[in-house]
Amino acid sequence: MNSQAVPVNSLLRHVAPLREALAQAAAGVIGSGYFVLGPAVAKFEVDFAAYCGVGHAVGVANGTDALEIALKSVGVGAGDPVLVAANAAMYGTSAVLACGARPVFVDVLEGEATLDPDGVAAKLASEAAVKAVVVTHLYGRLAHADRIVALCRARGVAVVEDCAQAHGARDAAGRRAGSFGDVAAFSFYPTKNLGALGDGGAVVSNDAAIAGRARQFRQYGWSGKYVNALPGGRNSRLDEIQAAMLSVMLPHLDAWNARRRAIANRYGAEISTPALELPPQAGDESVAHLYVVRSNRRDEVRQALATAGIQTDVHYPFPDHRQPCHGGRFDAVSLPVTERDAARVLTLPCFPEMTDDEVTRVIHACRPL
Ligand SMILES: *Cc1c(COP(=O)(O)O)cnc(C)c1O
């Protein structure tokens, strides 16, 4: 190889143009004397809620906590059945388990990897007392939230969106990820479309009561200082430095998403080989968080790309219901699409700072496959 490998991501390149602005914002926090839940968090919450087109945002410590707190805020508690996909690296499932609730797995749509609305309808009919559905907008593409929300509203079941890979994705009416369900969870882990320089997350909602409960859950269940009113309270706060970093980055999010989409759509237009099944082209409904192809010869393809200097990854290799932590509790569960995908998905490099030349190199490396 005469040139460096194409990485799957580069956070160093991502933050390089913002270095000065980030350093200044961090210095501002250091000089303010507020370090946890102060003015920087309050400002980011207002701006992020406006960006998502919702009434309220509540900063929390990470995306998994955001999911757990979102679930608790809509009343999910011990033993409650919660519908969840099994193809998203245990994030939703872990949050359901952290509530003491019971994950009920639903298969995903072939080629889309988001919850199958018919599967949701079938489970809502067959499982008694489902409390909530976690709808994950996986890989940056909006799930079929409208259909699932309609099914759930009719039965009084809450919809919790997992938007950790979908910051800014919009439907044809301009509605953003996080504004479809009752409540939504975001992660600001550094590799997300909007990422901090450490951990961070947010719960967003149009419902003031739900957002108010999320605010209580993130801080010990307090109704006021030292009054632990809500059972199940946590410590899961967003800190001032991360909020300040996020406020520097938020104005760039749409441009970053547009660049991701352009890369994904070049792949879609220029990669053509029987070895790879490509995802649909990306419109506004996708923010191209991950460019995931499918192959029956996944491991062989991965090796060939590595030899050609192209890094790849697998999101995700192990379905939730097959994870060892359950001790075999879900062994009888069968999710054909989820299980087949786990053996076939492969992620190609797609991040905003990729050069056109790197994109071309990935496309060329796919030709002989
Ligand atoms: C990253 C991610 C999460 C969890 O976020 P953390 O901040 O890492 O806890 C949840 N759901 C999805 C779909 C994710 O990609």
Image (tube, rainbow, N blue to C red):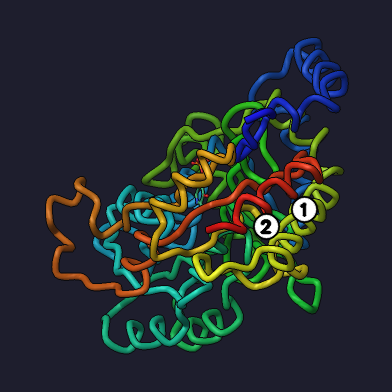
| Snapshot quadrant of residue 339 | bottom left
Residue 19: x and y in percent read 82, 21
Query: Secondary structure under badge 2?
Result: loop
Residue 292: x and y in percent read 55, 58
Q: Can you identify the residue that label 2 sits on?
A: 288
**Which class describes the residues within 10 Å of circle 1: few (<14), some (14-19), or many (20+)?**
many
How far apart in space, not on screen, are marks 2 and 1 (Cα)?
7 Å
Q: In the rendered view, does 101 fall on the left or right side of 21? A: left
Q: In this view, does 354 lie above or below 295?
A: above
Q: In this view, does 106 lie above or below 209?
A: below
Task: Point out the tag, 2 or 1, that comes first from the N-terminus.
Answer: 1
Q: Which residue is drawn at 78% across and 78% down?
A: 172
Type of amino acid at the residue the image marks with label 1 = Asn
Query: Secondary structure under badge 1?
Result: helix
166 and 12: which is toward the camera: 12
Type of amino acid at the residue the image marks with label 2 = Ala
61 and 254: which is toward the camera: 254
Q: Residue at x 58, y 50 (%)?
A: 348
**Which class describes the residues within 10 Å of circle 2: few (<14), some (14-19), or many (20+)?**
many
| Snapshot quadrant of residue 157 | bottom left
User: Can you see residue 40?
Assistant: yes
- The quadrant of the picture occupied by the N terminus is top right
- Report how many numbered discs are placed on residues in the image: 2
| Snapshot quadrant of residue 31 | top right
Q: Can you identify the residue that label 1 sits on?
A: 257
